[in-house]
Image (cartoon, rainbow, N blue to C red):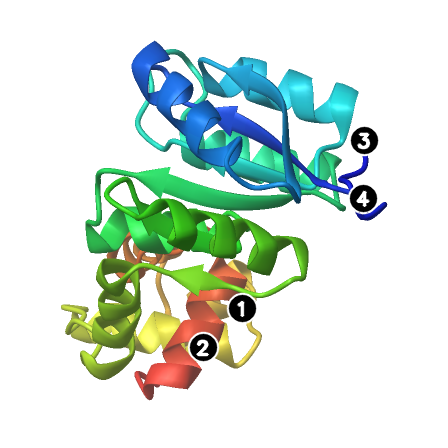
Amino acid sequence: MADDGGEKRIRVVIVDDHVLVRSGLEVVLGMFDDIELVAQAGDGDEAVRLCRELSPDVVLMDLVMPGGTSGVDATKEVVASCPNTRVVALTSFGEDRLVHETLRAGAIGYLMKDVSADELAEAVRAAHAGRSTLAPEAADALVRSVSSPPPAVALTARERQVLKLMADGLTNADIAERLVIGVATVKTHVSSIIAKLGVSTRTEASSLAIRRGLV
């Protein structure tokens, strides 16, 4: 659908589990001729389905909703399955963890629900153009993550030995032979190291160890 000037409108989907919030956002978006509300969703699963069907330009995504698919998970799925759709988080929560998870999931913007109508419209336009808009709470969270030193990792002396050999590319069997211990013992150390470093694989553990100077 085009506005009076013939320009294509920015097609938006609203995702929020509160009907009143969706109704209010519908009124707000209706104030701007260059923005068109094409659908509303009450949970993450419905949001993903609608985005796959409609391929909207921008999704305004609530983050804390009931059901099996959170706003963060829905953001991941939308970004993965609808590459031309931009997701802007619109939430009441500004905790550092949630900000980081949402942006890692692929959201291009992070706004609080007390944003003004004009600010919301500008964020939609910015997202459509590929630009990020962050609420002060989100920007502060990113600054803290960069300026704060990484937490100390309490590895035992043996775990540090195993980690160094992992970073050198040795297999569990090689490490066992080098340290004269059983392979099962090496596996236990590797599992402990991965858990303490907060990573998922030995490759990630090795990479993180090198970056942090742990080996």
Residue beneath disc 4: 8
C-alpha separation, residue under disc 4 versus residue under disc 2: 58 Å
Amino acid, disc 4: Lys
Residue 76 is situated, as x and y percent measured from the top left of the image, at: 56, 39
Q: Earlier in the sequence, mark 4 or mark 2?
A: 4
- Say how many tags the image has: 4
Q: Residue at x 50, y 47 (%)?
A: 105
C-alpha separation, residue under disc 1 versus residue under disc 4: 62 Å
C-alpha separation, residue under disc 1 versus residue under disc 3: 64 Å
Q: Are marks 1 and 2 in contact (CB under 8 Å)?
A: yes
Residue beneath disc 3: 1
Does 182 sit left or right of 127 as displayed? left
Residue beneath disc 1: 174
Q: Where the C terminus falls, by quadrant?
A: bottom left
Judge whether residue 185 can be spotted in this image: no
Q: Residue at x 41, y 20 (%)?
A: 22
Amino acid, disc 3: Met
Question: Residue extending furthest right?
Answer: 6
> Taking 208 as reference, is 211 above or below it?
below
What SS does tag 2 mark? helix
The foreground one among 26 and 106 is 26
Q: Earlier in the sequence, mark 1 or mark 2?
A: 2
Q: Are marks 4 and 2 in contact (CB under 8 Å)?
A: no
C-alpha separation, residue under disc 3 versus residue under disc 4: 6 Å
